[in-house]
Amino acid sequence: MSPVASDDKLVGIVLVSHSAEVAASVAELAKGLAGAGAAVPVAPAGGTESGELGTSAELIGAAAASVDRGAGVAVLTDLGSAVLTVKTLLAEGDELPHNTRLVDAPFVEGAVAAVVTAATGAGLEAVAAAAQEAYAYRKV
Amino acid sequence: MLDADFFRRWMLAAASSVDREAERLTALDSPIGDADHGTNLQRGFAAVREALEKEPPATPGAVLTQAGRLLISKVGGASGPLYGTLLRRTGKALGDAAEVSEEQLADALRAAVEAVKQLGGAAPGDKTMVDALVPAVDALGDSFAAARRAAEEGAVATTPLQARKGRASYLGERSIGHQDPGATSSALLIAALAGTAEAGGESGGE
């Protein structure tokens, strides 16, 4: 079984999409499919601050801060500026919680895997690995 | 030597240039992108201008670091983190000096362009802003005017290329025949630098 984080703190999950609706819906979907995952802190960061399609560094920072319980934060993104913005925030060092990681994973399947794994109390390493492994789930 | 006011004037010139060219940038972004490049950059540089008019930072490094931070937070598209990284890395490389030489600026920009290449995973020939920035920093050792020419030529030379990065890359061969909007805005940024140097009497040796 995955290594359990100390003092039962759960890894937080941030879902970054160009679309506010996509980010919020995938968060809802992942928590719903995870069942016991309802306790996992999951925050969407979708669209721009003015509600358009795009990426907002402010929304990402706020979402990461809101799910940080001290066990690390896994960030999943859709594509393009979502990826580049998170990478840039990580490179700048001080704008995201300590122990925040951009996870290379498919957005929907990775979010479900991350929330399910985080709900077991697994650490950031295991949550990130589970989300990344979702790339290997073949459908046909 | 280039002081904080030089960098303030460069950023204001870039903001004006983006305002003037916003429609063209968005038009270039329509056939091969998502038709938001002009408006996105305009929003970002408007925030840069507003901050500079309120209270300009005291050093060249701080002017560029602030501008980069604002582009990262305000643009909303991929050009935000890319241009934000370009300006922040340049600003950080210039440190706390009150004045920097043209050579120091060229070295800082070259290092920042490397950071942009790494962030986006783009190489020359991929039909991106890198195609204007790499020749520009290579020519900056000669003069600001040479850098402007090199950036503009680099931008024009993206037209026959097939995009290998960003949304345009999904179009495959259909991306051929369009000038890259990011290379075009990069040429505007370098032209604003050269224009600022000419207006201030910094000839860059030419």
Image: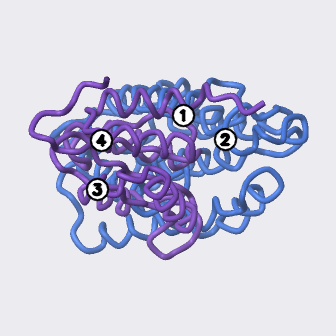
Chain colours: A purple, B blue
**Number of other residues with Cα within 10 Å of mark 2, as a class: few under 14, some 14 to 19, many 20 or more:** some
Residue to which mark 4 is pinned: B91
Marks 3, 2: nearer the viewer: 3
- Whether residue B85 is visible to the viewer of this picture, yes or no, is no
Task: Write down the quadrant of residue B127 in the picture.
Answer: top right
Q: How many marks?
A: 4
Give me the C-alpha separation between circle 2 and circle 1.
Answer: 9 Å
Please give the residue where the numbered disc 1 appears in the rendered image: B120
Residue under label 3: A39
From the viewer's perspective, is B96 left or right of B171?
left
Taking the spot 59% from the left edge, 40% from the top edge, the residue there is B148
Residues at discs 1 and 4 both on one chain: yes
Mark 1 chain: B
Q: Residue furthest front?
A: A35
Which residue occupies 16% across, 44% down?
Answer: A9
Give me the C-alpha separation between circle 1 and circle 4: 19 Å
